[in-house]
Amino acid sequence: MRQVATAFVCGLLFGIGLIVSQMSNPAKVIGFLDITGQWDPSLAFVMAGAVAVFALGYRLTLRRSAPLLDKSFALPGKTNVDKALISGSLLFGLGWGLAGLCPGPAIVSSSFGDPRIWMFIVAMLSGMAIVRMIRQRTRG
Amino acid sequence: MTIVNFTPFSALLGGALIGLAATAMWWLLGRIAGVSGILGNAIGARGIDRLWRLAFLAGLFSAGLIAIAAFPQAVHFSMEAGAAASIIAGLLVGIGTSLSGGCTSGHGVCGVSRLSVRSLVATGSFMAAGFLTVFVARHLL
């Protein structure tokens, strides 16, 4: 229960950060990606602020043997660069540049009353489901 | 290139809040705050593994809801993409983040902070693809 409440508060804080930084504003994201035109460098500062804080928080936390509310730290298992990493990232960047939306901001802005956000989210969940289905088939 | 709409202070502040939320997730729960992974795994997981993920997503959703209800003048939202582009973009983002195992938060913020080679390659790749997409869409088409 404590873990669930903690995750909720973390999500809330994360979402506030996305709104304050305007990462949840597609026009702002497109403005950042439009490097050869009318460029808005703000999102580089979002990235810098977030990385500076987490780089420190991550390292300080690793002095502990376990997180405060769980038994162990969970890090992604994969460490090698493969084709799926690069092709997936390129596809993600294509979609990000097309609409100015990525997963976190899409969820945050889903209550703003614009139906295109929900179209994006349903399509995104479908895309995730497609990859999961293909992976299950090729494994089994 | 001309620089427009630059908001460095709110960007840094918002970014620091994102970093703080990611730090709290790591310090308290030992989890990486990667939204695409949390979303993708919320469906397949069971029990507490599903609950904390749904709670994180509910927190994200509530942040938007509270902001738009209580401080609408502080919420900036403007979107150019039409319905068809939004659907295609959503599909690409869903497929891409599943294949690469992360998005702007998991790879771009958390992975880059940890100097994970996979995340540095992923972030370079999706940034490059994003710059190229906007260049083609805005200046060539």
Image (cartoon, helix red, strand yellow):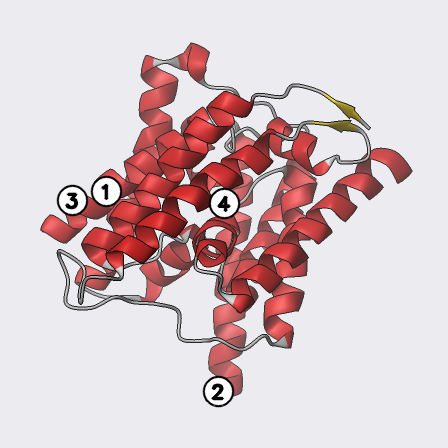
The lab-note entry on whether marks 1 and 3 share a chain reads yes
Contact check, label 1 and label 3, Cβ < 8 Å? yes
Front label number (4 vs 1):
1
Task: Say which of A115 and B64 sits in front.
Answer: B64
Q: Secondary structure at mark 4?
A: helix
Q: Earlier in the sequence, mark 4 or mark 1?
A: 1
Please state if A133 lies on the left or on the right of A93 as rendered.
left
Q: CA distance from mark 4 to mark 1?
A: 20 Å
Hey, what amino acid is under mark 1?
Phe
Q: Residue A73 appears at what percent x and percent y?
A: 25, 66
Q: Secondary structure at mark 3?
A: helix
Name the disc covering residue A5, or none: 3
Q: CA distance from mark 3 to mark 4?
A: 24 Å
Q: Residue, x 52% and y 33% (percent of image)?
A: A23
Q: Which image quadrant for residue A20? A: top left
Question: Which residue reaches farthest top?
Answer: B73
Q: Residue, x 43% and y 39% (percent of image)?
A: A107
Hey, what amino acid is under mark 4?
Ile
Q: Earlier in the sequence, mark 1 or mark 2?
A: 1
Q: Residue, x 63% and y 45% (percent of image)?
A: A96
Question: Which residue reaches farthest right?
Answer: B140
Contact check, label 4 and label 1, Cβ < 8 Å? no
Q: CA distance from mark 2 to mark 4?
A: 27 Å
Mark 2 — residue? A139
Q: Residue A36 appears at what percent x and percent y?
A: 81, 35
Q: Residues within 10 Å of mark 1 (few under 14, many from 20)?
A: many
Mark 4 — residue? A121
Q: Residue B56 appears at what percent x and percent y?
A: 29, 46
Task: Say which of A10 and B60 sits in front.
Answer: A10
Mark 1 — residue? A8
Q: CA distance from mark 2 to mark 3?
A: 36 Å
Q: Residue A133 appears at what percent x and percent y?
A: 49, 73
